[in-house]
Amino acid sequence: MKKVSLRYIVPIIWSLLIAAVVYTLPTGCKASQKVAAKTGAQLWAENCQRCHNTPSPSSFSHEQWETIGLHMQSRALLTDAERNKIVDFLKQ
Amino acid sequence: MGIGSLYPDPVQSNQKIREQPYASLLKIQTTKYLIMRNCRHYQIVFWFLALFGFLAPASNAQQVVDSSLLDRISTLEKEVADKKQGDDHFMVAGLATFGFVTNKTTIAGVGSKSNSFPDADHFEFSPLLLWRHGNKFLLEFEPSFDGSTLGVNWADVSWFAAPGFIVRAGYLVLPFGTYSKRLAAGWIDKLPTDPTGVADVPPTTDFGVEIEGGLPLGNMKWSYDVALSNGLQLLPDGQMQSAGFSDNNKNKTVTARLALLPLSNSSLEIGVSGMFGHVGDEGSSFESSKTDMYALDLNYVKLFSPILVNVKGQYNYIHVNDQQYLNPADSSNYSFENTTKTGFAQISLRPTGVTSKWVKNLEVAFRYGNYTTPKASLWGEKTDVTEFGLLYWFSWRTVFKLGYTTSKSNSSTIGLEGVKTVSNSFFAQFAIQL
């Protein structure tokens, strides 16, 4: 019974997630004003610590932050706006 | 704004600087002549001569200063030209870990002790090479030395094609759960070891292509990650390994992960993954074999002042359809339910909000892991692992960890049913991001 429930529950959750995304795509695939108004510092604090400690802006040069920004966007699946704001903050 | 608008034309500037002292000198000489002719006051002449005598060396000094200034400007112009921002950028990052482990293992009541400087799980040197071409392409290559072999963690090219749409090709980390892709690095992992089974079951590095992206959704965010790769290869005992560079059949394996970050501060992430594909060698008795795998992952990081709470977990379910396997001991066929379950739950606490610098750099971590392989197979066992860790952060990317791990395993392997193994280990590990 346990095996059966697991094998079917996971696809059901996945299907619900897909359905939610498809349902909201036409109108909702954009950041709310509240999220869009966040500063680079806020996004840096919120997103970096999801996996590791927040990095010091002085750790890398401007050019290096640009490169690391792309690398981290693909690792953490940041939105483009988040990446741009965080990198701009780290370059200050 | 270009460099040209910031810096005036160097030729015109230099000419103005050279002309200025000569113009001043000419003006003084003319004034002196007029005064001598009209006034004939020798005292005045004397003073003007004295003044001229004073100004002449000053003018020479000015020329020396001007020459020095010109040299400096020339040097700066060269430096600016040398540091001109290009489209490409190359850098080296990566990580290194080094540690010590002492262990006592008891198998069916018979104990043994060992201690060692790094073994494969606790030593790694992995420089990460990153090439960026403009803002659209990124090449990543991470070779890794684990103490015995020099391998490659990943080697791929990413194309940031559009907002929320990244295309990648090469040797990839597959999007099955999050541990392998995000949390396995020594300076990120809160404990000295990988959670049992999760990091390498199933193998999550493969040759293929991938699309992924993160997109906003009102106050929330969601992300997708889909890969098409060669897939896995079913071994004679029912375990699986990566098929490698050359696929073992004509079917490709699909791996996908969808994740939702339902809170606007991104503190919570819930992900669901699946991996589906044929795993048997073409033309072999396993030709019809296929796998379906699922993973659930959770990540929650939030500051409850003054404590930063960090919760992570992943559960993997791995299944291969029914097959007949060959027992090497007596060449007989046998079958078993080829299902493997593995997972972990982890919490770590760090008092980042306290004033003491020494205390705020401390962190404590706890992890429970379970790894259950198929009963009545040649590799069946049920293992429970509990781990405690105490960390001290020298910087945001440099950490020293002390860890204590207890592992209790109960065998369900054919012929070894009920054999118990208990292992206790103490770890000391240093990890740094390069």
Image (tube, helix red, strand yellow):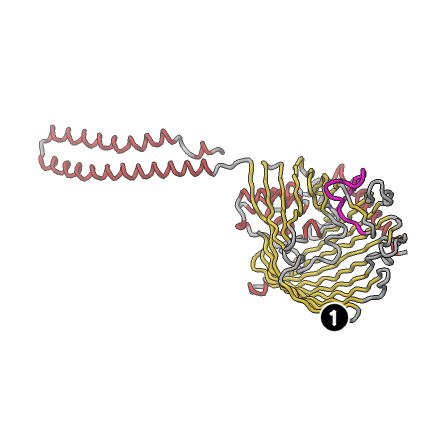
In the image: residue B331, left or right of residue B142:
right
Number of callouts: 1
Which one is in front, A90 or B74? Answer: B74
Where residue B318 appears, as percent x and y from the top left, is 81, 51
Residue at image point 57% right, 51% down: B434
Residue B35 in the image: above or below residue A55: above
The chain letter for the residue carrying disc 1 is: B
Tell me where residue A70 sits by quadrant: top right
Residue B17 position within the rendered picture, expressed as x and y whole percent measured from the top left:
31, 33
Residue at 45 percent across and 31 percent down: it is B4
Q: Quadrant of residue B282?
A: top right
Percent across and percent down for residue B269 are 72, 51
Residue that protrudes farthest toward the front in the picture: B330
Local packing at callout 1 (Cα closer than 10 Å; few below 14, some 14-19, many 20+) is few
Note whether residue B306 is visible: no
Asked if residue B214 is positioned above or below residue B194 in the image, the reply reads above
Q: Which one is in front, B131 or B13?
A: B131
Residue B51, can we see it? yes
- Identify the image quadrant of residue B124: bottom right
Placement of B16 over or under A19, stated as above or below: above
Residue at the (36%, 29%) spot, across then down: B12
The part of the chain drawn in magenta is B239-258
Residue B253 belongs to the span the image colors magenta: yes
Judging by the rendered image, the residue that carries numbered circle 1 is B111
- Residue B246 covered by magenta stretch: yes
